[in-house]
Image (cartoon, rainbow, N blue to C red):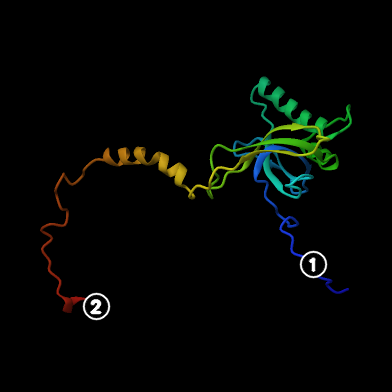
Amino acid sequence: MAFKGLTVDENNVLGRRVEEAGTYNVRLLPTSELKTSSTGKEMLVLNYEVLDGKYAGGTIKFDNVVYDDTTPEKEEQSLKRFNTLLVVAGVPAGTQINTLAILLQGLKKYNKMNVTVEWNSEPNDKGYYNLNVTSHNPTDPEGSKPNGVFAPARQQPGASNFGNRQPAIDQAANNLPDNFGPSVDPFAGAGTTVSDADLPF
């Protein structure tokens, strides 16, 4: 079968970017996975695709949901967070979940929900601001609702973090010991003069 042609449409592309904060009806993407956090805790990394509205097809990535059992209070909060995910996705009440791997399978099967997102307060290492999922809700029958808040302007990579630390770096440099004295040239009096003829090049 041969290619039959198409009309270029900027609204019909893969990998669209969601450009506003708000609430979005989403489906969980198969790229969502179970990982271990930098602190050694189990976590889900959830990625979503917007289902409707002007950002349909756009992605919201890296919703990290961590299981923290370091205190009874943190464990209870973690269990409520995971239970909320299951309830809003439509997993039937009474379903027994014994592992986070099974929980992720359940979310992939019952994969539709609504998420509320805001912009992170700090840019990533490339200078871009990412959307941060702040809550999970049942699918909104009225559809996705961008709120008109766009991402802050891109920062130069590393500029925000390094720039904020520069005064501390300068102060640390000023506090280093002066091993040679204030005006001592460690090479003064070395006494050898090399002529151009003595150079190997």
| Residue found at the very far top of the displayed protein | 73
Instruction: Using the image as rendered, state which of residue 139 and residue 80 is in the foreground.
Output: 139
In the rendered view, does 90 fall on the left or right side of 156? right
Q: Position of residue 198 (x, y in %)?
A: 18, 77
Q: Is residue 11 above or below residue 28?
A: below
Q: Please say if the residues under marks 1 and 2 sit with CB atoms less than 8 Å apart.
A: no
Q: Identify which amino acid the numbered label 2 is placed on.
A: Pro
Q: CA distance from mark 1 to mark 2?
A: 67 Å
- Determine whether the residue tagged by mark 2 lies in a helix, strand or loop: loop
Quarter where residue 187 is shown: bottom left
Circle 1 crowding by C-alpha within 10 Å: few under 14, some 14–19, many from 20 = few
Residue labelled with disc 2: 200
- How many numbered markers are drawn? 2
- Residue 98 seen in render: no
The image quadrant where one finds the C terminus is bottom left
In the rendered view, does 201 fall on the left or right side of 116? left
Q: Earlier in the sequence, mark 1 or mark 2?
A: 1
Quarter where residue 121 is shown: top right
Q: Identify which amino acid the numbered label 1 is placed on.
A: Leu
Instruction: Using the image as rendered, state which of residue 97 and residue 87 is in the foreground.
Output: 87
Q: Position of residue 93 (x, y in %)?
A: 88, 27
Q: What numbered label is drawn on residue 6?
A: 1
Q: Position of residue 9 (x, y in %)?
A: 74, 60
The residue lying at 60 percent from left, 39 percent from top is 38
The residue lying at 67 percent from left, 27 percent from top is 69
Quarter where residue 13 is shown: bottom right
Instruction: Using the image as rendered, state which of residue 11 and residue 133 is in the foreground.
Output: 11
The residue lying at 68 percent from left, 46 percent from top is 18
The image quadrant where one finds the N terminus is bottom right
